Image (cartoon, rainbow, N blue to C red):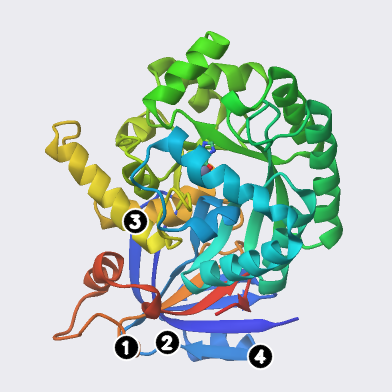
Amino acid sequence: MVRQVFTGSMIHPDETGEIVFKESVTILVEDGKIIDVTENPDQEKIDDFHADEVNNLSPGQFIVPGFIDGHIHAVQFPNLGLGYDKTLFDWLEAYTFPLEKQYTDQQFAEKVFDIVVRRGLQTGTTTASYFSCLYTEACVILAEKCSQFGQRAFVGKPNIDVPRDNGYYESTEKSIETTKAFIKAVEEIGNPLVRPIITPRQALKCTIELMQELAKIAKEKDLHIQSHVNETKDEVERVKEEFGDTCTAVYDSTGLLTNKTILAHGIYLEDSELNTLAKRGTGIIHCPTSNINLKSGLCDVRRLKANNINVGLGTDVSAGSSYSILDEMRSVLHVSNSLFLTGHDNVPFDYKDAFFMATLGGAKALTIEDKVGNFMAGKEFDALVIDLNAENNLLDNFTDYTLEENLQRFIYSGDDRNIVSVYVKGRKVK
Ligand code: GUN
Ligand code: ZN
């Protein structure tokens, strides 16, 4: 049994979603689980815990929940920063699918995924929901890297069975068979932090038969599901032409919408689609950097929330140009301000809203809020130690700032140099 104590300032969303600032708390962690969180505890209580490890935060440091990246394409890392002169469909054909085809090369996969997982942890992503590629071996390498470096992860092998010109697809049968093999291989890694996730790429890339089969597998194995929904106007129109209905209706008719399903984007959802998503408990992953880079649109997240949909954040690398959720929080605010400036929203989001989406909001969208998202006793200890006096960091401390001001300064003007330690289920991973 390993017992850890953390004492210092703490910021987190409480169960109601309100961001709570505490100047001095002690968090007791046993085998990665939070046992107790006490404000100004007496020394006797701490001594009685008989900790193996005591961490006293220094002035300027505070602890926050780990960040959750609810949508990231691990395989697209080599394309970071490329192709933003295009829009979605052209970008996919010119940049994305040709790159993804290269992952039959397992050495290449090993090299890329080693970097993906380590960099994610460095920037504070303690939970990631990954899209990999069509090739099972490469997907398993990604899951192994997550397990090795200690990241909490959902790893998905995307399914595409609609024929495409460059051959990047599988037959329906093969797609089902390789998905089952992939699930088995991830289960054999035996790390409860690393789970397979069912990943139909998008309605236009899958047949109805495939989507139905995938929904069945998810149900049988009680797995999460992830996909894309209504990212561009073109996509919405093509889905209507192909299926005669909305994308949400197509997913729902095949059984893909559950309370363990997360869908990226959701910019152009009709009211009826919002209703369906809310009824099924399906979450939306907001990816504002990607949506700006590819000129896909401005997602009205307030409308989603007003319709009782849980919203988390995704970097959507490499349509997103940064793998940092901190950067994504800024994009949330920029997109929200843009909606305000163009008369679409009366009340723009603030830094606390973005912080919620990056932590408990993401956990709720993924229905893992019983495990992570804040520091309630009983949850697992996924945490970042933020230091605004960190060496070589970009922030100067000219005066005494409040804890509220320090969170604000970190979100708007900090970077990964301010994230000095990262923990996943109590394990120090940075
Ligand atoms: N829709 C289908 N595939 C993709 C992808 O790889 N990236 C984004 N942004 N949208 C998609
Ligand atoms: Zn995506």
Look at the numbered discs 1 and 4 and tell me whether their residues touch, using CB distance below 8 Å: no
- In this picture, residue 396 sits left or right of residue 30: left
> Real-space Cα distance between discs 2 and 4?
16 Å
What residue sits right under mark 2 in the picture?
A: 57
| Residue 62 visible | no
The percent coordinates of residue 184 (x first, y second) are: 86, 49
Look at the numbered discs 1 and 2 and tell me whether their residues touch, using CB distance below 8 Å: no
> Real-space Cα distance between discs 1 and 3?
22 Å
The mark lying in front, picked from 2 and 3, is 3
Crowding at dot 4, Cα within 10 Å, few <14 / some 14-19 / many 20+, comes out as few
The mark lying in front, picked from 1 and 2, is 1
- Say what secondary structure mark 2 lies in: loop
The mark lying in front, picked from 4 and 3, is 3
**Label 2 amino acid?**
Leu
**Label 3 amino acid?**
Met
Label 3 residue near ligand 2, CB within 8 Å: no
Q: Establish if 4 lies above or below 356.
A: below
What residue sits right under mark 4 in the picture?
A: 52
What residue sits right under mark 3 in the picture?
A: 329
In the rendered image, which quarter contains the C terminus? bottom right
Look at the numbered discs 4 and 3 and tell me whether their residues touch, using CB distance below 8 Å: no
Compare marks 2 and 3 and give the one earlier in the sequence: 2
Compare marks 1 and 4 and give the one earlier in the sequence: 4
**Label 4 amino acid?**
Asp
What residue sits right under mark 1 in the picture?
A: 392
Compare marks 1 and 2 and give the one earlier in the sequence: 2
**Label 1 amino acid?**
Asn
Q: Residue at x 39, y 18 (%)?
A: 271
